[in-house]
């Protein structure tokens, strides 16, 4: 009799605890009940790393069905968002300008909007430290990876070569993504590769840990010519000393990076994702340093693409 009472009491207490825990759990929003796909990039790049941590936070905190998709980069991401295969994605503002206008790699304007300006990406031109290549002009006649098909890297690399007066036909383009470019440089199958990403890019950081590398400078006059000829989004900067083991400053070109969505995505989803993005900024930044650059005051400046209505509402509410 006593054993039976104890069992009944234990079952009752267990039920009370379960009900209590359920009552404390955050309510799952309607948008989180549907698949949320974030178009990232190559698995060794910042896009994918950032997207993976954001998706993990959304799954943990909102029980969202969120996953990051491996892609070739900005152009690929924008196409996936435009066709509805992804609801969010990362993209460079120069590729976005082409997507909005329906030029370059895009046959027609895409129905896309911005959720946030995230951080500025750096254009990397990577060679082995023992290479005789010292300038962009030295790439003529060399085997160089200008980025994979469907990548924003390919867009920028060609513009830099053009601004440096190096004909595309004078470069033997291997056309590789970041992962393959890293392996090809390590094995001396290419002499250099281009990359556009936040600092530090994980794959290049790991490459530099085992193989001394050097970054080629991109002179301000080259940046100015590229900026004047295209979207007006390129700026001169410097790689900080110590980046990938460097012991001297390197001139660089930067381009803003945005979190992009579709006009078809519900306002509630964009508001919810932005709330999580900003709430977990410091947490994500411990693993993805570029995430620390997210700034609510700057996130609204997304020219040449309009903010999504859900993003506009989020930023208005966040000022209260």
Image (tube, helix red, strand yellow):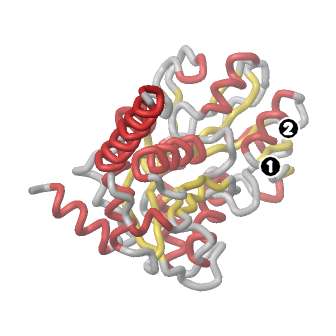
In percent of width and height, residue 256 lies at 44, 52
In percent of width and height, residue 129 lies at 73, 20
Among numbered discs 1 and 2, the one appearing first in the sequence:
1
- Whether residue 159 is visible to the viewer of this picture, yes or no, is no
Q: Quadrant of the N terminus?
A: top left
Q: Is residue 28 left or right of residue 241?
A: left
Q: Secondary structure at mark 2?
A: loop
Which sits in the foreground, 16 or 91?
16
In percent of width and height, residue 288 lies at 49, 34
Q: Is residue 187 left or right of residue 41?
A: right
Q: Are marks 1 and 2 in contact (CB under 8 Å)?
A: yes
Q: Is residue 123 left or right of residue 297?
A: right
The disc placed on residue 176 is: 1
Give the vertical position of 279 relative to 134 (above or below): below
Question: Which residue lies most toward the front here?
Answer: 1
Task: Tell me the crowding category of disc 1: few under 14, some 14 to 19, or many 20 or more residues within 10 angstroms, Cα based.
Answer: many
In percent of width and height, residue 60 lies at 46, 44
Q: Is residue 260 left or right of residue 218?
A: left
Residue at 90% from the left image edge and 36% from the top image edge:
189
- Whether residue 267 is visible to the viewer of this picture, yes or no, is yes
Residue at 42% from the left image edge and 26% from the top image edge:
2
- From mark 1 to mark 2, how far is it between C-alphas? 10 Å
Give the vertical position of 293 relative to 160 (above or below): above
The disc placed on residue 295 is: none
Camera-nearest label, 1 or 2: 1
Q: Secondary structure at mark 1?
A: loop
Question: Which residue lies most toward the bottom here?
Answer: 108
Residue at 59% from the left image edge and 54% from the top image edge:
67
Task: Tell me the crowding category of disc 2: few under 14, some 14 to 19, or many 20 or more residues within 10 angstroms, Cα based.
Answer: many
Which sits in the foreground, 298 or 136?
298
The disc placed on residue 190 is: 2
């Amino acid at each position: 009799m006593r054993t039976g009472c104890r069992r009944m009491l234990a079952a009752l207490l267990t039920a009370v605890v379960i009900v209590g825990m359920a009552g404390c759990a955050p309510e799952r929003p309607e948008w989180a009940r549907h698949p949320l796909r974030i178009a990232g990039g190559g698995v060794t790049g910042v896009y994918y790393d950032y997207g993976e941590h954001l998706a993990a936070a959304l799954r943990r905190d909102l029980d969202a069905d969120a996953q990051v998709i491996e892609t070739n980069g900005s152009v690929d991401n924008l196409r996936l968002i435009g066709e509805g295969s992804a609801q969010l994605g990362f993209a460079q503002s120069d590729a976005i300008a082409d997507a909005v206008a329906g030029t370059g790699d895009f046959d027609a304007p895409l129905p896309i909007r911005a959720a946030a300006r995230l951080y500025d990406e750096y254009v990397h031109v990577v060679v082995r430290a023992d290479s005789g290549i010292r300038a962009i002009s030295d790439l003529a006649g060399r085997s160089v990876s200008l980025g994979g098909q469907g990548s924003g890297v390919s867009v920028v690399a060609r513009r830099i070569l053009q601004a440096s007066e190096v004909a595309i036909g004078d470069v033997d383009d291997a056309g590789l993504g970041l992962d393959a470019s890293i392996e090809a440089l390590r094995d001396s199958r290419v002499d250099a590769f281009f990359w556009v990403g936040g600092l530090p890019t994980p794959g290049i950081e790991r490459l530099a840990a085992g193989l001394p590398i050097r970054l080629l400078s991109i002179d301000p006059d080259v940046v100015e010519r590229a900026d004047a000829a295209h979207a007006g989004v390129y700026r001169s900067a410097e790689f900080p000393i110590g980046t990938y083991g460097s012991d001297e400053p390197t001139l660089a070109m930067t381009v803003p990076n945005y979190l992009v969505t579709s006009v078809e995505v519900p306002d509630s989803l964009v508001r919810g994702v932005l709330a999580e993005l900003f709430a977990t900024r410091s947490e994500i930044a411990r693993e993805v340093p570029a995430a620390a650059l997210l700034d609510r005051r700057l996130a609204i400046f997304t020219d040449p693409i309009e903010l999504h209505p859900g993003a506009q509402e989020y930023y208005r509410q966040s000022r209260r």
